[in-house]
Image (cartoon, rainbow, N blue to C red):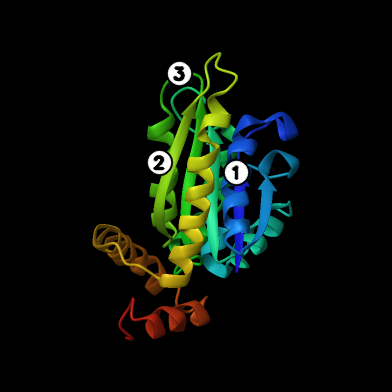
C-alpha cells in the first residue's frame, strides 16, 4: 500500500505545511504503508490555458513535470493534499496543479482511492481550505476520510500539538484503504459529478474509445 502526499507550499523544507503533511505520512507509515511526498514547488508546471487538447487524446500540450507527479499519484492507493492558506484559498502552486489535472477529473482517473487533506494558516481559513481540498478529491472520485488544519499565528508549538491528530489521520487513511468504508453523502456527490463528466466521455468516445469502454465496464455510463 502506498500513500502519496502532494504539498502546495513554496517554502520547501522550511514549510510548516510540509511538516504537517509529514505527520500524516508518518502515521500512515506506522500503520504499514509506503509513503511518498510530491512538492509542487520543486516541479515545473505551466498554468492551464484551457485549450482542451487533453480532452481529445488525454495528453497535455505542455511538456513539463506534471506527468511525473500524475504517475506517482496514479501509483498510490491513498492521496493527501496539503496547502497553506493564501488569501482565504489554496496557494497559487496548488491551484495551478489542480487545474492541470482537469482531464484526470473528467475521466475519473483516481476513482477508487481514498484520501484526506490538511492546511496551515496564520489565523483563519484553514478549515475552509482543507474542506475545499477534500471537495477536489471528491471531484477526482477519491473518497475522503477527513481533514484538519492548524492555525499557527505566533504559536511555535501549534504544530507539535497537532502531531498526534495528524498521525491518527494517516492511520485512519490506511484503515480506510484496507476496509473500504462507504460514505453515502460522498458517493451521491461523486455519482452526480460523473453524470456531468459522462457527457465529456460520450462526446470524445471516437477519440478515446479505451476510456469510453472503461466507463462502460465501471457502470458509470451505458454503452450506446
Cα gap from disc 3 to disc 2, whole angstroms: 17 Å
Residue tagged by mark 2?
A: 132
84 relative to 144, above or below:
above
Q: Which residue lies at the image location 60% right of the left edge and 34% below the top edge?
A: 17
Q: Position of residue 152 (x, y in %)?
A: 53, 22
Residue tagged by mark 3?
A: 123
User: Nearer the N terminus, badge 1 or badge 2?
Assistant: 1
Mark 2: few/some/many CA within 10 Å (<14, 14-19, 20+):
some
Residue tagged by mark 1?
A: 23
120 relative to 46, above or below:
above
Cα gap from disc 3 to disc 1, whole angstroms: 21 Å
Q: Position of residue 68 (x, y in %)?
A: 71, 58
Select label 1 or label 2 by which is in front: 1
Work out which quarter of the rendered image holds the C terminus and state it: bottom left
Cα gap from disc 1 to disc 2, whole angstroms: 20 Å
- In-front residue for pair 68/15: 15
205 relative to 223, above or below:
above
User: Nearer the N terminus, badge 3 or badge 1?
Assistant: 1
Work out which quarter of the rendered image holds the N terminus and state it: bottom right
Q: Left or right: 219 with respect to 166?
A: left
User: Nearer the N terminus, badge 3 or badge 2?
Assistant: 3
Q: Which residue lies at the image location 30% right of the left edge and 82% below the top edge?
A: 222
**Helix, strand or loop under label 2:** helix
Mark 3: few/some/many CA within 10 Å (<14, 14-19, 20+):
few
Please say whether residue 107 is visible from this viewpoint. Answer: no
Amino acid at each position: 500500500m502506498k500513500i502519496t502526499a502532494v504539498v502546495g507550499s513554496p517554502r520547501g523544507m522550511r514549510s510548516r505545511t510540509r511538516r504537517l503533511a509529514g505527520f500524516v505520512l508518518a502515521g500512515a507509515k506506522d500503520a504499514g504503508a509506503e509513503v511518498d511526498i510530491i512538492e509542487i514547488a520543486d516541479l515545473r508546471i505551466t498554468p492551464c490555458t484551457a485549450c482542451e487538447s487533453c480532452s481529445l487524446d488525454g495528453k497535455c500540450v505542455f511538456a513539463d513535470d506534471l506527468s511525473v507527479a500524475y504517475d506517482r499519484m496514479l501509483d498510490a492507493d491513498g492521496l493527501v493534499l496539503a496547502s497553506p492558506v493564501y488569501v482565504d484559498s489554496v496557494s497559487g502552486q496548488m491551484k495551478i496543479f489542480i487545474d492541470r489535472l482537469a482531464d484526470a477529473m473528467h475521466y475519473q482517473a483516481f476513482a477508487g482511492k481514498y484520501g484526506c487533506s490538511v492546511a496551515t494558516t496564520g489565523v483563519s481559513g484553514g478549515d475552509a481550505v482543507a474542506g475545499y481540498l477534500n471537495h477536489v478529491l471528491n471531484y477526482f472520485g477519491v473518497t475522503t476520510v477527513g481533514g484538519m488544519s492548524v492555525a499557527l499565528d505566533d504559536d511555535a508549538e501549534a504544530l507539535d500539538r497537532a502531531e498526534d491528530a495528524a498521525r491518527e489521520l494517516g492511520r485512519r487513511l490506511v484503515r480506510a484503504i484496507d476496509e473500504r468504508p462507504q460514505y453515502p453523502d460522498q458517493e451521491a456527490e461523486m455519482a452526480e459529478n460523473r453524470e456531468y463528466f459522462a457527457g465529456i466521455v460520450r462526446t470524445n468516445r471516437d477519440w478515446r474509445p479505451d476510456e469510453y469502454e472503461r466507463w462502460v465496464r465501471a457502470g458509470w455510463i451505458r454503452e450506446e
